[in-house]
Image (tube, rainbow, N blue to C red):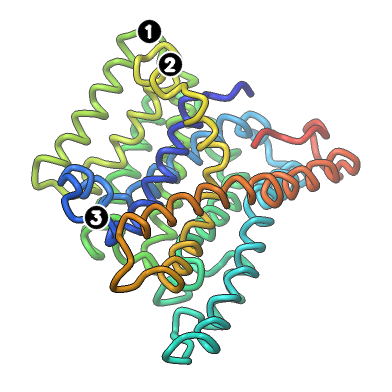
Amino acid sequence: MRPIHALTSLRGVAAWWVVLYHFREFFPAGTPWAIQAFTAKGYLAVDLFFELSGFVIALNYASRMETFRLGDSIRFLLLRLARIYPLHLFMMLVFLANPIALKFFSTQGTIDHRYDPAYYVMSLFLVQNWGLTDDIRWNIPAWSISTEWASYLVFPILTPLLVPAYRRRILVVGGAILLLVLLAVLTAANGGELGGEIPRLGLMRCLIEFQTGVLLCHFTTLCPARGPWRSGIAAGLALALFAAYALLPVPDYAVMPAGFLCLIYALTDENNPLARALRVPVLEWLGDISYSTYLVHYFVKDWVKFLIVGPDTPVLAILGTYVLVTGALSVVLYRLIERPGQQAVQTLLRSRPLPGSGASTQPGPR
């Protein structure tokens, strides 16, 4: 499947939105209000990730899974596991340095509840945010990887069941609307914002938004965003929804997930002005390494605070170190851990086709 370059760039922008969100308390005094307000909403990038993930997964795999085959489903899950697990496992091993440092080198000499052993074990099995805990711990952003894995498990089961619905535009649109309403009701009843109550709501938040991304992909197949009218209207609607959230007292769940869907749809048109603006090599590169950025940045934050932050340390030095080290480690981890791990599993699948599979033995797209 030919990549949609603007969506790759969008993934990179979203990853850095999260990075800055988690370090916003170290912004220097006098930072423009608009930048502070934007970064304070960086948790919404996760909602964009979930929808974008569902869209891309459906774009690359839905046509192969219209009929359920056990071999195809296992192959799909192995490819997705290869995409997310090697780096996740590596980071979980690296995070063991945190409680060790707290025990032997901190002034308190104690390990807090963030480094709960049971949560660590659940993280190794990617089930830490399936409603089994009351907090998020260790590598904080990895909660979303746990819920993504749940979405991957559901995808090969749900896809064959919904094939007739995916072929009718009215059912695709109606299904997306119903899911957005369900998300709004659940969020309003439990915390009131999308970033709240993650241990209880994070799994449903991901499953719902991932499926809206899947529905958007099928809508794009039925009604491509070609020409200035469709993609232009979608882009305008996305910007209007974002502006409504920024300027009016409306909750995030009422407008942002719908806005992200409109944005993704608009960017599938390569001639859309916004899509052209995002088709920049450096932004695409940030998108390629965005998963590494996402999983490493909280570890960098922990160690910047541990080693550098002090009463006399210039704020710009703290922020600059965080940004530079996060960027550098993103490149290193992408090249040494993320891509080699994925390629190893792809090579294995290529050499040993799974029984009961109707698909080619060539590895699927990322």
Which amino acid does the dot numbered 2 rest on? Answer: Asp
- Among all residues in the image, which is located at the extreme top? 227
User: Residue 41, image x and y in percent?
Assistant: 27, 50
Q: Residue 113 sits in which quadrant?
A: bottom left
Q: Reply above or below: 362 against 128.
A: above
Q: Quadrant of the N terminus?
A: top right
Neighbours of disc 3 within 10 Å: few (<14), some (14-19), many (20+): some
Residue 361 x, y percent position in the rendering:
83, 34
**In the rendered structure, which disc, 2 or 1, sits on the residue that comes first in sequence?**
1
* Residue count near mark 2 (Cα–Cα under 10 Å), binned few <14, some 14–19, many ≥20: many
Name which residue type carries label 3.
Answer: Pro
- Residue 28: mark: 3
- Residue sitting nearer the eye, 64 or 225: 225
> Please, is residue 176 above or below residue 118 in the view?
above
Give left or right: position of 79 versus 168: right
Horizontal side of 154 relative to 6 (left or right) equals right
Mark 1 vs mark 3: give the one in front. 3
The residue most toward the bottom is 109
* Residue that appears at 84% across and 41% down: 347
Q: Is residue 242 left or right of residue 303?
A: left
- Residue 307 placement (x, y as % from top left): 46, 71
Q: Are marks 2 and 1 in contact (CB under 8 Å)?
A: yes
Question: Mark 2: which secondary structure?
Answer: loop
Badge 2 is on which residue?
Answer: 269
In this figure, which residue is indicated by the disc labeled 1?
A: 227
Compare marks 3 and 2 and give the one earlier in the sequence.
Answer: 3
Can residue 186 be seen by looking at this rendering?
no
CA gap, disc 3 and disc 2:
38 Å
